[in-house]
Image (cartoon, helix red, strand yellow):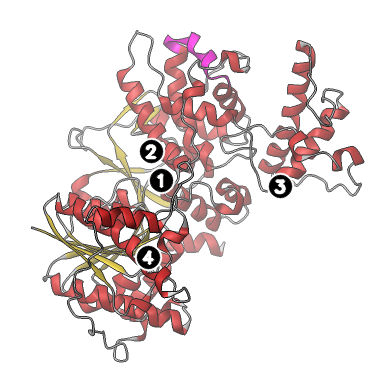
Amino acid sequence: MKAIKKSLTEEEYLYLDFSHQTKGCIFPLHTSVTLFLLSYCDCKIFKICLVVTKEVSTDSLLLRDDLIQDVEIQIISRQELPPIVQNCCLPAVLERSDNFCRAGLAVVLRHIIQKSYEADPLKKELLELLGFKKTCLKACAEVSQWTRLCELTIPLAIENFLRESSDQPPTIPVEILQLEKKLSEPVRVHNDDKLRRQKLKQQKADGAGPPLTKGKAKSKVHTQETSEELDSASKSMELKVAFSKLTVQEEPATTNREPSHIRKAKASDLPPLEHVFAEGLYFTLADIVLLPCIHHFLVIICKKFSEKLAEFPLLASWYQRIQEVPRVKTAASKCGIQFLHLPELLTTSTEQHPNLSEVPGVEEQNDPLFIGGPRPTMAKLMEKGIEVIFSPHPCPTWTLDWNVLPAAVSPKEGKMSGDRALRKQQQLNNLVYVVTNQAKPGDRIVDFCSGGGHVGIVLAHMLPSCQVTLIENKELSLIRAKKRSNELGLNNIWFIQANMEYFTGMFNIGVALHACGVATDMVIEHCIKTRASFVTCPCCYDKNKPTSYYQTAAQLPPQRRLIGKQCMCLVDLDRARAAEECGYSVQVISMEPESCSPKNNMIVGIPI
């Protein structure tokens, strides 16, 4: 009961977009997905607001009863949104403090699951939706192609498909084909070897498993019946494991050792694990996200182009299987989803979409191996007259007086070691000097990829007349930052847990300290889009190149450090030239002292 009382006293607002409604669906699909999860979790702890577009009148709007059973919803216009939420893409959740907002589908759904569990700790199965180590859809869409597929591209592709559907045979969205291909790939899980040996043992016990080969692979000829037996035996093991997890029942531990021929089987001889659900063996948040989207796609396919079903046999099987998950049918019926009864489909590769082999995979692909090295590359650039030239530091000896600042301003409050906190202070000296010399009263400053708020909190304290916003995807980092802010009594600071691209507000200065890899480029692009100044310190320059390119650690020989520094500077000069082509005056400056960080370049851009 204590957990329930706590959740009620800390009631949060959930804001969802509304554009239009049809039978069984509220658009955009992000809203239908969120309502489906609320129904699945039987979650009543949020105040839900539907935010209508300009074209929809809040006075005349009547929501279909079949779409929102057991849910109280308030309808508002976008102008009625709290200021912090107006700067974000929906869905969004706002805490009662009005300065901590979570935005974007994956972040909001993960938060709903966590709050539902906190309200009723007996619902342990809800946490299973977050997957192994609670990482399901945790990686932001900017870096994870799987998160991007589930969170962004599939919902958008299906919305476009529904909008454009006619009586002519449609072009199947490539995102659907990517999902079908994903379902055809072997499953990789943390206890992969153990489960594959269990599967091999089961196949042999059923008499359907092929003999282990020794030396060269032998040709195998199976009758159709033998193949079907093998398929059935394969699936039964995966289904048993998957549904034992759903009922929070662990499989009985076996004390007997596996037979010798099972233990000694080579990994290459073990049968692959097949998908039961979207991410593999277990029902997760990814399945929750995909279900409303795929359902509405299949409704159109079955109604007008049923012959197309044979092109996605694995997707159709997944759709049928997910209906067997406890509470899914009940949750779906409360959201107006009436499940289709699909015909049995064969799942051999010849019957899948003819272009499936050409569809790009979901997993990230690295570039081919790089041939060469930093020295020949630098030599070629020098032959062309391209040299590394830094702009002079505007004030290399300037420093904040850390001894007189409140303790919560210092990075030491972020639980750092003494040496690391000193280097962080030195890094902050550089960024704070540049930003404070650019900022004017009333300016909006955004600390992108803010982490624990080391930059943003200092700026909010030093510039009380400016509004500072911290944007970070990691919840725990922002919670630590908010705690420090509360200790300081700051009232000019916002906290937004979201992917960078979900922040849509206007601002004057963008800051990023050690935004990883392409995140630095995204920060600069975001600033250019809004004509804001930027002060960035890049990190993790190019993961596809050998690390020798960018090594600048103090323990390395001086010549090696110099080459690494020059390589980093060339990348940053290229970033600077790109911004200059967009009408910016840009400088690449080396932070002082250089020992404050191995990644010590600072790119400063001001719109002309």
Q: From the image, which quarter does the C terminus lie in?
A: bottom left
Q: Nearer the viewer, mark 4 or mark 2?
A: 4
Find residue 469 and report its horizontal and vertical position in percent.
27, 63
Identity, as a three-letter code, of the amino acid under mark 3: Asn
Q: Earlier in the sequence, mark 3 or mark 2?
A: 2
- Residue at the left extreme? 608
Q: Residues within 10 Å of mark 4 (few under 14, many from 20)?
A: some
> Is any part of residue 445 visible from this angle?
yes
Where does residue 281 sit, x and y in percent of width and height?
65, 38
Residue segment shown in magenta: 303-313
Q: Disc 2 on helix, strand or loop?
A: helix
Identify the disc placed on residue 152.
2
User: Distance from label 3 to label 2 (Cα)?
Assistant: 30 Å
Sequence-first tag of 4 and 3 = 3
- Tell me the distance, in whole angstroms, between the alpha carbons under discs 1 and 2: 8 Å
- SS majority, magenta: helix
Residue at 14%, 70% (x, y): give it: 438
Q: What label does residue 191 carry, if any?
A: 3
The reply to whether residue 487 is in sight is no
Callout 1 touching callout 2 (CB < 8 Å):
yes
**Per the image, is 309 magenta?**
yes
Query: Which residue is depicted at the point 11% across and 70% down?
Result: 440
Type of amino acid under label 1: Ala
According to the picture, the residue beneath numbered tag 1 turns out to be: 141
Asked which quadrant contains residue 12, the reply is: bottom left
Q: State if disc 2 and disc 3 touch (CB < 8 Å).
A: no
Q: Amino acid at mark 2?
A: Leu
| Whole-number angstrom distance, CA of label 1 to CA of label 4 | 33 Å
